[in-house]
Amino acid sequence: MRKVNVHEAKTHLSRLLDRAHAGEEIIIAKGGEPYARLMPLPGRQPKREEGTLKESAQIGDAFFDPLPSGWSGED
């Protein structure tokens, strides 16, 4: 959750709307106190961020080896 003041929210409203649309919740503060919350509408899927699982899967060289003869992929 990100917290911004009113001046920053007015200056960067379009950018903050894009972030909220992507699923982030943003608190707008007035005089240092939380005043309003900017968040995505219910039922909207957050935009998926590319590359988030990039380091979690490893594909070895054997993946690219030819399939065994007679293998059809059907049961």
Image (cartoon, helix red, strand yellow):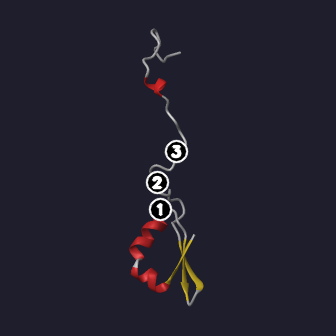
Bin the neighbour count of mark 1 within 10 Å (Cα to Cα): few under 14, some 14-19, many 20 and up: some
On the picture, is 29 further left or further right than 65? right
On the picture, is 7 further left or further right than 35? left
- The image shows residue 39 at horizontal and vertical percentages of 53, 70
Q: In the rendered structure, which amino acid carries the disc numbered 1?
A: Ala
Q: Earlier in the sequence, mark 3 or mark 1?
A: 1
Secondary structure of the residue carrying numbered label 2: loop
Q: Earlier in the sequence, mark 2 or mark 3?
A: 2
Q: Tell me which residue sits at (46%, 65%) in the image.
A: 21
- The image shows residue 52 at horizontal and vertical percentages of 50, 50
**What is the spatial separation of the Cα atoms under label 2 and label 3, in whole angstroms?**
14 Å
On the picture, is 16 further left or further right than 56? left
**What is the spatial separation of the Cα atoms under label 2 and label 1, in whole angstroms?**
9 Å
- The image shows residue 12 at horizontal and vertical percentages of 40, 77
State the residue in front, 32 or 72: 32
Q: What numbered label is drawn on residue 1? A: none
Secondary structure of the residue carrying numbered label 3: loop
Residue underneath mark 2: 49
In contact (CB < 8 Å): disc 2 and disc 3: no
Residue underneath mark 1: 22
Look at discs 2 and 1 and give the one toward the viewer. 2
Bin the neighbour count of mark 2 within 10 Å (Cα to Cα): few under 14, some 14-19, many 20 and up: few
Residue underneath mark 3: 55
Look at discs 3 and 1 and give the one toward the viewer. 3
Q: How many marks?
A: 3
